[in-house]
Image (spheres, rainbow, N blue to C red):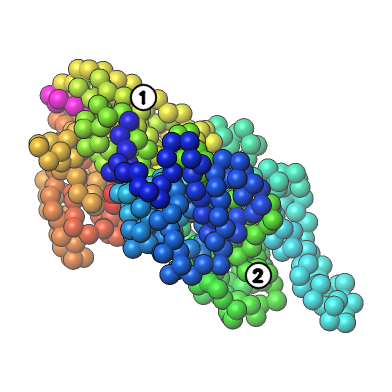
Amino acid sequence: MTELGAPRRLTDEQPGDGARPRVLVAEDIGETGIELLRRHCEVEIGTGWSRAQLRERIGRYDAILIRSSTKLDAELLGEASRLRAIARAGVGVDNVDVSAATKRGIVVANAPQSNVITAAEHTMALLLALARNIPQAHASLTGGAWDRGRFSGVELYEKTLGIIGFGRIGQLVSHRALGFGMHVIAFDPYVAADRYRELGVERAESVEDVYRSADFITLHLPRTGETAGWLDKRALAKCKDGVRILNAARGELIVEEDLQEALASGKVAGAALDVFGAEPVTEHPLFAYPNVIVTPHLGASTAEATDRAGYQAAEQVIAALTGGLVTSAVNVPAIHSEDAPVLRPFVGLCRALGRIAVALAPGTSVDRVHTEFLGRIAERDTRLLTIEVLVGALSGHTEEGVNEVNAPAMAEERGIEVVETKRTAAHDYTDLVRVTIACGADSVRVAGTLVGQRFRPHLLEAWGQRFDMQLEDHITVFRYRDKPGMIGRVGTTFGAHGINIVSAAVGRQDEEAEGGGVAVMAVTTDAPVPLTVVEEIAAGDGFVAGQTVSL
C-alpha cells in the first residue's frame, strides 16, 4: 500500500519494536476514552498546556487527541516529527490543517456520529418547549406570578413537522416526532425515496411543499454557500401563518433579520434557536421577543456525547497506530502501490463527474449512483474512484463533511444504491468514466476522460448529448432548442453581468435522430455564475433548462 506521506525514520525518541506508542490527550475527552487508550498505549494528559509547551513537546508523541480548542496548524505539525495520528473528539476538524497533516503522512480522524443522538434530543426538547412555552412559564412562575392562561400552548399530536435536511439527525428527529403522533414531511434531494418509506415519513417533492404544510419546521442542513441564508424573507412568506421555526444546526441557515420581521408581523408564531450567525453571543435583538426560546449552542452538550466522542476518537487512534481500519479518517486512504500511478489522476475527474451528475439530475431524490469504467482503467481496482464519485455527489448536501472513508456509509444510510461496472474496451478513448444518477424512473448520465500528459479532465457527455470540453472550476450547462443565435444569447447575458467565458462546447443531434432538435451547451467561466443569471437565461425563449456547478 502507498503511504499518505513520506516514510519516517526511527529516531532515538521513537519507540522501537514492541514499544507501546505514546499518545497525548491535549483536551478533556472523558474517562472512558482515556481508559481505552491506556490498554494499548502510553498516555500523557496535557490538558492545560500552552501553545509553546505543546510545540516543545509534540515531537515526543505518536498520536494526539483534541477537541475544539487546540489548533494544529502547519507550523505546529512541523514539530511533530513522529506523529502518526490526530483524532478530534467531535464532529469536524476545522482546527486541524488536514492538508499539512496529509503531506506528513498523519491520519486525521474525528467522531462524526458522537453527537447525533444528543442533537436530535435537543431538537425535541426545543420542539416541546416551543409548543408549551415552558421557559417563559418557568421564568414567570419563579418571578412570582401564577399565570396559567398566559402560557397556553399547542399540542404536537396530529401537527405536521417539516424537516429540511434528512440525514442522520433529521431521521432521528423524525422517529421521535412520529412517537408523539405527529405527521412528518421532509425535504432532502440526496436521500433515496425508499428511505422515506422505510421511516414512515412523507417525501416532499420540493422545499415549498414543506413550507405549505408544516406547523413546525426544523433545519438540519450542512453549512455551505448554497444553504447560507436558506430561511429568508422569501422562504418565510411561503410558510403557513403561525408556523414555528427551530434551528439546532447552523446559525447561518437563517437570515435573522428576516426572522425578526416575521415574528413581529405574526407570520411566525415562535422560534427556538440553539445556534446563531455569530457566536458566542449574549446580546441579540431576537432575545427580546417573548415567543423566542434560545440556548447557547447546547446541541452536542451532554455528558454522554462528550464521553462517546472521546471513546470514538480513542478507537480511531488505536486503529491508526495498530494497522486497523480508521473508519472516520478525513484524509485520503491508501491504495495499492501498483494502481496508484493510474488511479490518482482520475480522482479529481470522478469527483467532478459526481458533482455535475447530481446537479443535472432530474428528480427530487437520488436512488442510485452507477459508475462505469471502460478501457485500461477497468483492469485496476477502481473502488476508490467510485467512492470519489460519491464524495462529489454528496459534498455540500450532508450534515457532516463527506470524505473517501465515510461516503459509502453515508450513501447506505440514505438508501442510495451504489453500482460499479467495468469493461476493458472503450470506443474512441483509451479510458472512459461514466456516471449515471437514477432518480426514480428518471436518470442522467455524464461521462469524462483524461487527456494528455498532464491528465487534464474533459467532460464528454451531459444531458444526453456528446461534446468535448476541458473542465475548469466553474461550469454551466444549458439545454435548448437547436436554432441559430442561442450561443450568442448566452455570451451576451454573461457579458452583461461581467462573467468571463473561458471555453464553450455544444452537443447536438439532427431533427430526425431520436431526441433530435435539442442541443446542450457547456460553458466554463473563470468565476462562479450566479443562479439568478442561469435562471434568467433558462427562462428565455427556446431554452429548456440550465444548471451551474462549481467544482
**Residue lying at 51% horizontally and 41% vertically, measured from the top left:** 20
**Mark 1: amino acid:** Glu
**Mark 2: amino acid:** Val
* 488, 133: nearer the viewer: 133
* 179, 451: nearer the viewer: 451
- Residue 354: give x, y in percent of width and height: 33, 39
Label 1: element kind: strand
* 352, 243: nearer the viewer: 352
**Residue lying at 56% horizontally and 34% vertically, measured from the top left:** 195
Q: Is residue 208 magenta?
A: no
Left or right: residue 281 compared with residue 492: right
- Residue 98: give x, y in percent of width and height: 37, 53
Which residue position is annotated with label 1?
420
**Residue lying at 75% horizontally and 44% vertically, measured from the top left:** 179
| Residues drawn in magenta | 428-433
- Residue 143: give x, y in percent of width and height: 84, 81
Q: Quadrant of residue 128?
A: bottom right
Q: Is residue 432 magenta?
A: yes
Q: Which mark is residue 387?
A: none
Left or right: residue 426 compared with residue 85: left
Left or right: residue 196 compared with residue 457: right
Residue 481 sits above or below residue 378 on the image = below
Q: Measure the alpha-carbon separation of dots 2 and 1.
A: 47 Å
- Residue 497: give x, y in percent of width and height: 21, 65
Residue 8 sits above or below residue 285 on the image = above
Q: Quadrant of residue 3?
A: top left
Label 1: how many residues lie within 10 Å, few (<14), some (14-19) or many (20+)?
Answer: some
Q: Which mark is residue 294?
A: 2
* Quarter of the figure with the N terminus: top left
**Residue lying at 28% horizontally and 43% vertically, measured from the top left:** 6
